[in-house]
Amino acid sequence: MALGLFFSLLFASFCLAFPSTYTRNSTNICPQLEIALGNASVISPSEADYPSHTAWKKPSCIARPSATPDLQKVVRLLTTQKIPFAIRSGGHSPSPFAANIDNGVLIDMSSFNHTQYLPHKNEAIVGAGGRWLGVYNELDRYNVTAVGGRVVDVGVGGLILGCGLSYLSDLYGLTCDNVVNFEMVLANGSVANANANHNQDLFQAMKGGANNFGVVTTFTLKTYSINQVWGGIKSYSLDQLPALLAAMQEYQSNPNKDLYANLMLQAFTTNATVGAVLNMVYLKPVVNASAFAPFYSIPTTGDTTKIQSLTQMMSGQRVPPLPRWDWFSTSFRPTASLYQKIGDIVTKAPELAAIQSTAGGSLAIGVQPINTNLIQAGKKHGGNSLGLPNINQTWFVLDAGWINADGDAMIHNATRALNGRIEDASKAEGVYEPYQFMNDASWDQDVISRYGVEGQRNMRRVQRKYDPDMVFQNLVSGGWKLPKSIPSTYDY
């Protein structure tokens, strides 16, 4: 296929994914919102609120409700007049329309940023528009923490609704599994609480449900008595990547895995001067825990590990300062031979040259080990929508960064092709897993169709019950939506 035709088809598919059927009244709605909320709560768009420029769009206006009744007014106005809208918590995702919109209204949840600790319940009520650093700082006052984001500047709402992976997840499950209650505004403007006793079907659907069912105002989260830990970042030269992947396989193969140990391996395969980093933490103040023994013999170029608070440890992690980002997610059961093949793919595949030919073009890989106890903990907490098999697995992510918008299509296609190579390698070994981690997925990955069949069916039933007019499928068209059809079984 000619390159120009390919890009034309890509653009057409992109537009179909984010329809503009309802844009006719979007400009006229802004004065009505000003009357309903007050002028100070309806503002002009600002690109500075998005870390990745790929998320820059042009909403007609931004509505910033300060309390739940204000949010109810906004939702009722938008739905009754069929105005397209988007919802933003932290705006961390580079997906172009996950938390932004062209010619519609952006609901900015940043005023919902409070954290209230409930010591008698070992729970915390957390505003959907907060960021994890604010949550952790408040909980640190009581020497407790929550199963939350590993990057502290990420928004609360987006991470939880995408499932959320935490350094505590091997112990307690995903972030969404630790939600005790979702308070949310439904499509008709009413407030609903979804928990183990009320609206149980909605409660389960929200665990992995993204923006498909309503606008969450607060999450009530379980808290845990963890504060002082051993952890930090070990840095390595890029030529140590094969040894690091072999150590990762050994770490994941331990049948008695220490659940207090957690880590993520990243390697910057287009930039040997950065090399590879191991973000690691032991959730007790114990130096050099034996759980990490497979990594200790690998020479480092830097080491920040020490006894510190978990919040301090996570605050030491940084995102490279590139203005544009795209991510791709895949999953597999880890084997030594597959890790060896992946090491070759991410350092030698021809797509790397295409990425590097773009201004600032860079690629980082992320290897996230998932233990069976994470899946079991989720079931103990009432289950979620994901349908994860009870096996050790790896959630793998490709992070591509670059500078200019004219590189968007090139980077996206090259990174998708690399992801395809990794999936082909895992399928060839018979260890491919269909699940795609939403928080790491690209905009055109069909994430929810990779959930378990029963989870998908429940989500569709919940949509019909709580959003019969399909407001959060049609008016909120960005992000990862419910599949149009549900298979009777997996066939990947």
Image (spheres, grey):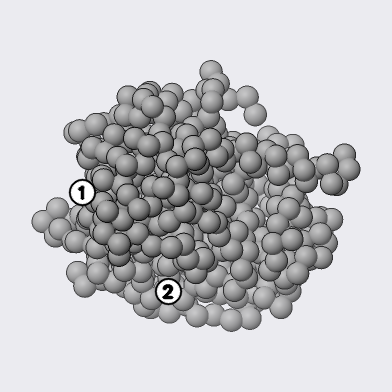
Task: Write the residue at 55% across / 56% down.
Answer: 57
Looking at the rendered structure, which numbered label has been put on residue 315? 2
Q: CA distance from mark 2 to mark 1?
A: 34 Å
N-terminal-most mark, 2 or 1: 1
Q: Which mark is residue 98?
A: none
| Residue that appears at 80% across and 55% down | 351
Q: Is residue 312 left or right of residue 254?
A: left
Q: Which residue is mark 1?
A: 69
Tag 1: amino acid: Pro
Displayed quadrant of residue 208: top left
Label 1 residue SS:
helix
Q: Residue at x 53, y 50 (%)?
A: 102
Q: Position of residue 191 (x, y in %)?
A: 22, 40
- Describe residue 446's horizontal placement relative to residue 149 as left or right: right
Question: Considering the numbered disc 2 on the image, is that residue within a helix, a strand or a loop?
Answer: helix
Residue 313 x, y percent position in the rendering: 42, 73
Q: Mark 2 against mark 1, which lies toward the viewer?
A: 1
Q: Nearer the viewer, residue 407 or 373?
A: 407
**Badge 2 amino acid:** Ser
Please, is residue 411 above or below residue 466 in the view? below
Q: Residue at x 34, y 35 (%)?
A: 80
Left or right of residue 338: residue 366: left
